Amino acid sequence: MAKLTLAEILQRWRADRRFMENVRAIKELPASPGAFAPYPAWVRPELRRVLTEAGMARLYSHQAEAVDAVHAGRDVVLATATASGKTLCYNLPVLQKILEEPEARALYMFPTKALAQDQMHEIHQLIGRLGADIKTFTYDGDTPDDARQAIRKQGHVVVTNPDMLHAGILPHHTKWQKLFANLRYVVIDELHVYRGVFGSHLTNVIRRLVRICRFYNANPVFICCSATVANPREHAENVLERPVQLIDRNGAPHAAKTFILFNPPIVNRELGIRQGALSPARRMATELLKNHVQTLVFATSRLNVEVLTKYLKDEFAKGKPVDDQFVAGYRGGYLPNLRRQIERGLRERTVMGVVSTNALELGIDIGDLEACIMAGYPGAIASAWQQAGRAGRRSGHSAAVMIARSNPLDQFIVENPDYFFGLSPEHCRVNPDNLLILLHHLKSAAFELPFEKGEKFGKENIEELLDYLVEKGVLHRVGDRWHWAAESYPADEVSLRSVNPENVVVVDTTVAGDHKVIAEVDWDSAFTTVHDDAIYMVESRQYHVDQLDLERKKAYVRQVDVDYYTDAMTYANVRVIEEFASQQKPNVIFEHGEVQVVRKVVGYKKIKFYTAENVGYGDVNLPEKDMHTTSYWFTIPKDRLESLPFTREELIDGLSGLAYSLHHLAAMLLMSDVRDLDRCIGDKSGAWFVKHGRDGRKIVGGGEDAGDGAPKVDAFDPTLFLYDAYPGGIGFSDLLFAKHHELVARAKASIAACPCKSGCPSCVGPTLEVGATAKEAALAILSLIDA
Amino acid sequence: MSLRDRLDRLTGDAKPARPEDDKQKKISELRARIEQILERRPTAADGSDKSDAADKSERAEPVYTPLGVESVAKGDEVATPYGKVFVATDEFDAGLFWGRRRLREMQELDMAAAARLADDPRLAGLAPADALFLDTETTGLAGGTGTLAFLIGVGWFAGDRFVTRLIFARDFTEEAAALSVLRTLAVDRKFLVSFNGKTFDMALLAARFVLNRQPDPLGGLPHLDLLHPSRRLLGHRLDNSRLVTIEEAVLGRRRVGDVPGSEIPQRYFDYLRSRDARLIADILDHNRQDIVSLGVLAVHLAELLTRGVATPDAEPSDVVAAARLHVLRGDPAAAEKMLRDLLAARVAETVGEGGRELSLLHKRAGRWDDAVALWRAQLAADPFDLFAVEEMAKWLEHRRKEWGEAMRLVAGVLDAPVFADEAAREAFRYRLARLQRKAKGLREEAADGD
């Protein structure tokens, strides 16, 4: 059969009536010719020659703007789309400076090693063509010991990542004297990635970096590159804690793109259930791949990546023998070699289809993909555009398809295409003065250089914190200085990316005597992905977890071939520790403050491939995880609640449905990722809470398990919590408190307007989980509290 | 809610009843630790220990008076452009014994041997009096910028005395002065001697110089780090490579009540908080002993290289190790002489390893007669010496083509219970089979030619 081009396939789809029934929008994003500018006069002739030879006879307008600002000594943040030539905006001034002053140094920071390697390649090319003696090196955990000394002394450009800067470079800054004393530029790429907890850590690492630069009398210029977010300048200024110039008018030309928003059909009208996003993703990807259109599919969870990869590999394994790498899975837990292999395969077009988590959102060069399918809204507008932007980086026509899942957020987006296409992307928020985070970095900073009275570190009064650390025995104060006075190495105590720095290593024990490490899982995810008896998948190969050894941080697995996968069930229980603010209304009290959250994995579901049937349950016995964070919540006095015409059980269902809806809408209101928040219904004392388990909803607690008899509604005033999903809190709860009325109003409007009969995943949640009256009850409760 | 309370809750620490109680608790804990340490110390040879007397007489409620360092060590406050620092001074007469050696032997350190130990030819042209012996005590092993060298101990030979200076920073504020004193003392020194200094002490001091914005005078000096040569020459018979262990094994000097290295950082932190120098008195002692030991150990190791078996307290295996070091440094002649002397000196024990080593040197140099003589001697002493059997067989097979003789030799040991594992025995079987094939071939040839 002759192969169709992408344009032809799109034409076919448009002509297919059944397909078009589910399409909510087709937007043609036009190509753009671009805006250009000449090289500034100060650019050295050899640089200009080399760049012209590489195909850049002129600069894009934003590149010219950027390099001029940087040359003049201003800190900048570039917020233009992907593939707009941001790299040149820093390579040009850096190379220029080193050519002028051979002792000058630059530090490049990338969030991942893969990206670092990619950029290294690019600057190496330039230097090679220049024929100059400029040395660039990556300095990260993989750098061999004997190379490290040479890099410290001779490297003009040192390429690293925040973790290495934090634990490997800053605490040893005396060894890096040459670098710091001559540091002219610090480049921070993918700045938008540094939000939430990670961003708060990075802000502190920058504080320490600036502090150390000051010690060596250096005052480097910061060059930041960010994806398109709502507040790039504000974000950069929050991270760098200094004024930053914004450059966001993109002068790069780009190819035309067809953007399709697709909503899978409803398959069960009674229950309001839609077809999952994986099926249409599979069908579309299959058609594209059959016609050799290189396609990237983004899935919203690692589990979905594995499942979809398996489906596609199965599809292409039938019939003619095709390379196993024709379709590949990709995610962060894969070992680096495997990831490099897949990236290369994409560039060389031996890998034609990839199913990935958002790990492939970032700027790793994977060549010229033509199509991108998003199986599910990625949870943030900025992510959606990043993912769509992966198709058609260089030229030609490209296509992006976003397929909605059943949750309220996806449904809202897909049913309101104007909103999506017109919406500004998310805000990036950081909270670098989160006490826990600040404390860790204060310790690291004190290790690096003693603190002096009157010194500033962020916005807090650090003297009190320093004295606290003296009391704890890690600092010693003498005169006006606080010195590090402990044997330990503070940088090792904290990882920048999660609460727990430990990773669990997955060991394949299938072949006796030849155990291999096949993947790594971060501590938090380990509980839900490699618990005992879980089915763990890598590149869609299945492994049964025989044992999760938490103490040794190893998961022992054995390769198996089964027809199901597993999905863990967790519950959370919240207890109020302190209220920061409170507002009383006739039927509700809403507050925000500090809470303790206990999370536990209780079991798992076994789900059959292809049919998605639930074919069984299993128990899991893992310890609880305890976290302190901030939360917004509201409480409804029980007598008010009981005045509604519903049974106690139905009320609980209504609250659960309401929580579901509010969670998703809050994420949209905050313009944050839906995973940044979590929800729980219970009692402020944490004595009881609602648990969604294998037997449906249960009320647990109050001293005994009340699941079998009547729920103890009269023992409590029900409270609905929406809490920050990070220890120490990230600042969402006071925002939600401030927007309480708006949140309630939106929930009311969206649930009331939902076309379903009694509840569905798009408003209050699947009725099988929340009960048949959830929608009605939720609306009644909303009316009550809105009074 | 106070900052402190929030922090305690977030970090999961228990909240103390009252802040004053907590402080009181900490002081009591500190005091208890100090008492514990003091009880462990041996009583001084010259009579009563001041602190013991105080304890004994005031059982009821001891009044706590911290002692300054000048009360526990002989020395002075030294003024520098960076402020003051305490320096403990000591002198040792050259005739004193340190273990089984006299300190004056340091004055005769063989510099050519030292150069060989350090693998640095620059040392050969210097004199023993140019040495600066150095050892530091620090607040941790992490290195990096947060570790302080609170005690920098140095020693050198001045005329007929061995002199030590222990530069002790009584607080962080004295570090700049301490480094300044070190620079002054290092002024006319031409090389360093340390134990693990190349990796640890130098790197740490380099960092401290940068942090205090002072120039580092030590970085470019030739450096004899005794850790590595100690491991090479003595590692085969010692449990570990700690200076104290080596001191006891080869210098015959045993320490009593030496403070364990792992306790040193915490002692210093406790001293900082309590200002009681009794906590660090034995650290000074320990450091001083380390410095002198450095000197004596250097002498011993150099002597192993120059005098081999004639070195007092040397074991044959030490001599073989010394010979190997000579070979490593490209001087097989020196190695040969050493091994020959070894064999000559103690016949029975040394046809073993020393003989083996020497025979290989002979073989490599083509001196077959000498090699074979040694192998024969080994076989005479032990017919099942597999090393000798194999070497002889190889020589017989390839150089003499006497397959019959070789076969008899190899066959003779095949069934003996001297093989470590089947693989080893298999190797010998294989050799025998090859010899048999060759022998048969020859017989057939002979038959043909008949």
Image: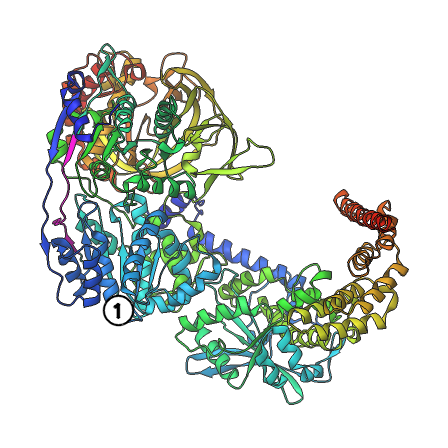
Residue A682 is drawn in which quadrant?
top left
Classify mark 1: helix, strand or loop. helix
Residue A347 falls inside the magenta stretch: no
Coordinates of residue A1 in the picture (x, y in percent)? 26, 23
Q: Residue furthest top?
A: A270
User: Is residue B328 at all visible to an observer of this figure?
Assistant: yes
Q: Residue furthest bottom?
A: B159
Q: How many marks?
A: 1
- Say above or below: B204 vs A381: below
In the image, is A229 to the left or to the right of A120?
Answer: left
Q: Residue at x 44, y 75 (%)?
A: B176
In the image, is A373 to the left or to the right of B200?
Answer: left
Residue B94 is drawn in which quadrant?
bottom right
Depth check, front residue: A68 or A161: A68
Depth check, front residue: A619 or A21: A21
Coordinates of residue A84 in the picture (x, y in percent)? 18, 48
Q: What is the three-letter code of the residue carrying label 1?
A: Leu
The magenta-colored residue range is A245-259
Q: Residue at x 47, y 32 (%)?
A: A623
- Say above or below: A213 vs A555: below
Residue A271 is drawn in which quadrant?
top left
Q: Residue beneath label 1, please?
A: A99
Q: Chain of mark 1?
A: A
